[in-house]
Amino acid sequence: KVVLNVISSGEALGEFAFITKKPRTASAQAITSVTAYRVSEEGYTKLMAGLPEWAQTMITNLVQRLSDSTELIRKYSQSNDLWNETTSILNGKKIDFD
């Protein structure tokens, strides 16, 4: 497995899928007891609508750059099989934005 990041209490996971409208690029594995909340597309849309347009654009651009970086990690890994084994580590509580 290739660990892409470690998620701590209060951080989000899976936001790439909302912003890029593409499937998640990694799985997640909890290393502690975790409480996770699912954010609906409607809840996410409400959250984004409350932001100024420049902030929405900045978030979209940053996520796209991170998504591109994930693709580069996959592309230049020693084994192409690693693409299906990238992961995020969950550690703590998630926030519900609904």
Image (cartoon, rainbow, N blue to C red):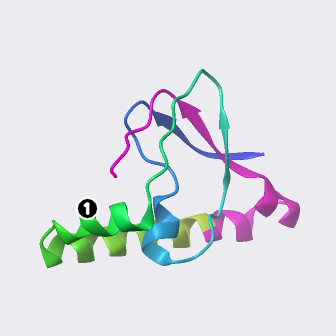
Q: How crowded is mark 1: few (under 14 residues within 10 Å), some or many (20 or more)?
A: few
* Residue 85 is inside the magenta segment: yes
Count of numbered marks: 1
Residue 79 against residue 65 in the figure, above or below? above
The image position of residue 11, as x and y in percent, is 40, 41
**Dot 1 lies on which element?**
helix
Viewer-nearest residue: 98 or 25: 98
Which image quarter is the N terminus in? top right
12 left or right of 31?
Answer: left
Amino acid type for the residue under numbered disc 1: Leu
The outermost residue toward the left is: 52
Residue at the spot 42% in from the left edge and 72% down from the top edge = 19
Q: In which quarter of the image is residue 79?
A: bottom right
| Residue bearing mark 1 | 47
Whole-percent x and y of residue 71? 63, 70
In which image quadrant can residue 25 be found?
A: bottom right
Query: Is residue 58 part of the magenta span, yes or no?
Result: no
In the drawing, does residue 65 fall left or right of residue 90? left
Q: Name which residue lies at 37% across and 44% down.
A: 96
Q: Which of 80 and 27 is in front in this view?
A: 27
For the residue pair 74 and 55, the one nearer the viewer reads as 55
Residue drawn 16% across and 66% down? 50
Which range of residues does the magenta coloring cover? Answer: 71-98
